[in-house]
Amino acid sequence: MKGQAGERLAIDGGPRAISTPLPHSMPGGFRIGSDEERAVIEVLRGKNLNRYGDADRPSRSQQLEIAFAQAFGVKHCVAVSSGTAALQCAMAAVGVGPGDEVIVPAYTWIATPGAALFAGALPVVAEIDASLTLDPADVERKITPRTKAIAAVHMRGGPSDMDALRGIAERRGVKLIEDTAQALGATYRGARLGTLGDVGAYSLQFSKIITSGEGGLICTNDEALWKRALMYHDVGGGMHYGLSDAEMLPGLSMRLSELHSAVALAQLGKLEPILADLRRNRAVLKAGIADAVKRAGLSLRAETDPEGDAGVCLVVFMHDPAAAKWAVEALRAEGAHAFQIYSGRRDYHVYCEWTPLVNKRSWHPDNAPWRDGPGAQLFDRDLCPQSIDLLSRAVHIDISPDLTSAQVEELTDAVNKVLGAGH
Ligand SMILES: *Cc1c(COP(=O)(O)O)cnc(C)c1O
């Protein structure tokens, strides 16, 4: 067997464990093919690029919403122009506004706190735990009488602790939003992520699990929230669904184009095989490195539901940030795609690097929720030491659904070699 401890590392001039370049992990993007081509051409030939254009049959956007709701076992879905737009609609749907606070994890794309901010609310940062998602104990501590919502973010395909978070939300009377941008299709105790809270937001941006290049989705089982999201995403949308004048609210324009919806529909059809391949590859890698992880006294990311994880990566916690930095360099030399989750460099995924927020920049001086409120030390680096410690020791290993079994084996060898080197 290859990949034993003691074998000369590629970083030290030894042979590479991985013989062919591994595919990058753009799961849906790399599977774009004739289905997506045909779908786009059909829309173009139909000469109707308007989601409300044809009274006789549902538009591509409406078909996407129906198909998604059905596949995810949820009552309502709205297709929108991005994951960020989906989060903004989610905030508006649950009624987040000036004077409110929204609890967000220390580790998430800046769009999550950004959506709270654009609603006029203060994003309040809570620690993550070893699952790289919200630490329920810190969420509990961060709740104040002003808390309107908790935004659970299922980072890197891994479910947040939804039992705990739902319990807190219910007990404390706050709304639960699920940012499922990085975990579309993943589950928690059998239910799809994004369908467990009050409202779920997804992204179809190119680096996500399935993609239309840009795009997003919102889902909810609550009809009132669905109507609010619908009106927020499209100022004219309410009319098309027969909402009364008394219900009508002003909205924006965040519709997903018919061309993007056509691509998203084709991609939705590929979700199950993509998830199956991701999960299989992850399971093989995880089993293959288990001994080396144990022998080195290290640990993997904690799992709130091992079966539910989407499988897009495996994360190993090293003993300290220097060891993580070294392991990434060594893994890359072997031919693996790996990175240190927080290296101290500018990165909009880590709260103390949300530069425009750290610097408290706002579009208008009167629209800065931290100005008069309790937000003075909002994003200080020492606010969430547990998160910084975890993220800077975390080595992220990419998993593509398109890895061959030989490539998974070589990747396993690479990780075993590096972990066996005893750093
Ligand atoms: C990508 C992402 C978003 C935003 O999605 P866009 O489609 O890029 O606007 C929001 N939250 C998280 C956690 C993301 O990874």
Image: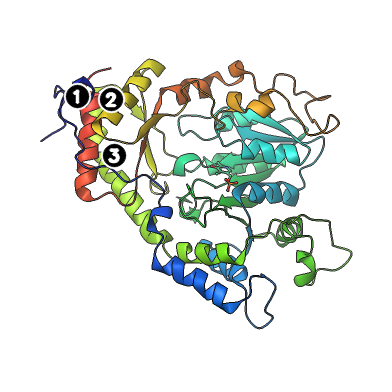
Q: Residue 2's spot in the image, x, y percent? A: 12, 34
- Residue at x-position 28% and y-position 25%: 330
Direction from residue 19 to residue 249 in the image, left or right? right
Amino acid identity at mark 2: Ala
Q: Secondary structure at mark 1?
A: loop
Reading the image, the residue beneath label 2 is: 330
Query: Is there a contact, CB below 8 Å, between mark 3 and mark 2?
Result: no
Task: Say which residue label 1 marks.
Answer: 9
Using the rendered view, name the quadrant where residue 141 is placed: top right
Instruction: Tell whether label 2 touches label 1 (CB within 8 Å).
Output: yes
Q: Secondary structure at mark 2?
A: helix
Quadrant where the C terminus lies?
A: top left
In the figure, 395 relative to 205: above or below? above
Asked if the residues shown at circle 3 and circle 1 are in contact, with their CB atoms under 8 angstroms apart, the answer is no
Q: Position of residue 118 (x, y in %)?
A: 74, 40
Viewer-nearest residue: 37 or 51 = 37
Q: Earlier in the sequence, mark 3 or mark 1?
A: 1
148 and 370: which is toward the camera: 370
Q: Residues within 10 Å of mark 2 (few under 14, many from 20)?
A: many
Question: Residue 70, relative to residue 377: is it above or below?
Answer: below
Q: What label sits on residue 286 in the rendered view?
A: 3
